[in-house]
Amino acid sequence: MSSSWSQPWAQAKGLTAVKLHPYCVAADDIRMCRAVRKAVGDDFTLMLDTLVYPGPYDRQDALRVGRVLDELNFWWFEDPLPKTDLDGLTELTQACQVVQVRMGDQVDDIHEYAEMVRRRCMDIMAGPASFGITALMKMAHMAEINHMNFEPHDFGRGTASLHVLLAINNADYYEIAVPQGCFDEAIYPGVYLDSVKADAEGWVHAPTKPGLGFEIDLREAKKVTEQTIQP
């Protein structure tokens, strides 16, 4: 299970990995990564997500940061270049010897991954948070037959991605925003009756209720509904 916070808060909550969101200024990001690794020690899993705040690196900076992440034994390097820079992504994936390149969680159509997979633009395939269970399962199988892990992106409630993770064996982490509840309960108070939360050892458990296993309060949901589409 990964988060986007920092130790010791995260460690005290039982989280086993932290995903950092830098500001994509290579020199500053390198200093941050070194400082965090020093603070958490060698046995804590770290990732770097450079998609936003404000955007990915250019090729030179991506390679520079990738070499440092190799040195610091980071687990993955997420969206380090624009998804359209296939040559740069292939070069970076080949250059990184320890950290794994994870791409790309901002796609509109599953077919966008075909050329990225063919050209080996990543070590880990990321599934967009906007995709449902069917599309994510297709991607998971695509990743598996190409000897890749599949890590669906999720920063909110996680219904689709959690069910997919429970059904495949080529994934390692479930992603959750912290403080836990900030992307569901805080934004839509009273709507979610079952929030996905990690336990004291960092595990997220399968739901046991009927259907998808997650309930919402429909009366509260109507209060925050902007548009209703009639069948």
Image (tube, helix red, strand yellow):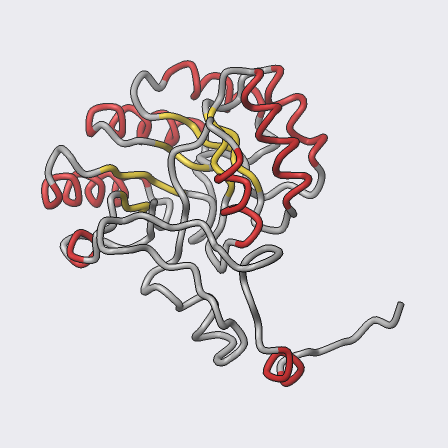
For the C terminus, the image quarter is bottom right
For residue 230, what is the image quadrant?
bottom right
- Report the residue at 34% width, 45% height from top: 1
- Residue 105 lies, in percent from the top left, at 55, 41
226, 159: nearer the viewer: 159
- Please give the count of numbered marks on the rendered protein: 0
- Residue 90 lies, in percent from the top left, at 51, 18
- Report the residue at 47% width, 36% height from top: 151
- Residue 168 lies, in percent from the top left, at 51, 31
182 horizontally vs 18: left or right: right
- Report the residue at 33% width, 53% height from top: 4
- Residue 84 lies, in percent from the top left, at 61, 31
141 horizontally vs 1: left or right: right
- Report the residue at 27% width, 43% height from top: 17
- Compared with residue 86, is residue 24 higher up or lower down, i.e. above or below? below
Specify the farthest residue to the right: 231
147 horizontally vs 45: left or right: right
For residue 65, what is the image quadrant?
top left
- Compared with residue 81, is residue 50 higher up or lower down, i.e. above or below? below
